[in-house]
Amino acid sequence: MVSALSIREIDVSRNILRAYMQKLEEVLDLDVAIVGAGPSGLTAAALIAEAGHRVAVFEKKLAPGGGIWGGGMKFNEVVVEEEALPLLDKFGIRHHDSDMAGSHLADSVELAAGLIFSALRAGARIMNCIHVEDIMVIDGRIAGLVINWTSVELTRLHVDPLTIAARHVIDGTGHDCSIARMAQDHGMALATPSGRIMGQGPMWAGPAEEMVVRNTMEIAPGLVVMGMAAAAALGSHRMGPVFGGMLLSGRKAAQLVINRLADPPHSSAAPGKP
């Protein structure tokens, strides 16, 4: 065993830098870029990576997991419907009966940790503390992301960003649906009844769980919305600490882009697997 006394601080720094730069270079050219490491984003990442595609999740916060951790008002239990239990079982996340027909309970910390671990083990990259400040649009199609450090955004420093190329982008940014809003702000017509962001409806958990899966779709060329981003973009309701719809929405988003990836790139400018 190497003595801890032989560790040099500069070597620690050098190894961290080398490993991170390798990660960063790997995510510069992706099949799928997911924005937001919430329940739908992590589910989609795990399934897309499992299918053999290059996928990374860009999360602006320090900790992935989105709104899972706090459960309902910091009571760390969440409700998951029976339809989504196969996903919990697939990811090794335990659950138990509730007194509501067709629903189970899961520990929110285990749910978050299990989804994060499953996405990473499947081969997805999770890049935390990164803010997506814009999108790339090539020939009328979203073709990647413009990224910077979250700390740069918070401190409003004038620092130019880097870019990530992706054949498909998935908006998992939650209530803000920030990537869909960027597309709208750049003059792209959205596949909504109004052609614009519809806005999130009030709490109504039952219909919301069905609608969030139904509204998971390609909302603009190259951009899929899922989870609460789909709810906000398409005008459906919120549902509180009920997470089955989030998981099923992530699965549907994954299936959509996996099916699309079977097609050739849309132009020579669109990125693909090397």
Image (cartoon, helix red, strand yellow):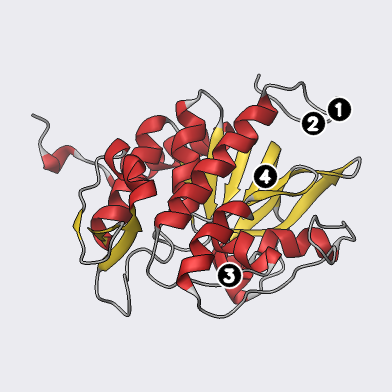
Q: Which residue is disc 2 drawn over?
A: 270
| Rendered image: mark on residue 235 | none
Three-letter residue code for mark 3: His
Q: Secondary structure at mark 4?
A: strand
Disc 2, disc 1: CB below 8 Å?
Answer: yes
Disc 1, disc 4: CB below 8 Å?
Answer: no
Residue count near mark 4 (Cα–Cα under 10 Å), binned few <14, some 14–19, many ≥20:
many
Between marks 3 and 2 in the image, the one whose residue lies nearer the viewer: 3
- Given residues 40 and 66, the one toward you in this image is 40
Residue 232: horizontal and vertical position, in percent?
Answer: 64, 68
Three-letter residue code for mark 1: Ser
* CA–CA distance in space, label 1 to label 4: 16 Å
Instruction: Kindly indicate the quadrant of the structure image that contains residue 107.
Output: bottom left
Q: Is residue 212 left or right of residue 141?
A: left
Q: Which residue is disc 3 drawn over?
A: 175
* CA–CA distance in space, label 2 to label 4: 12 Å
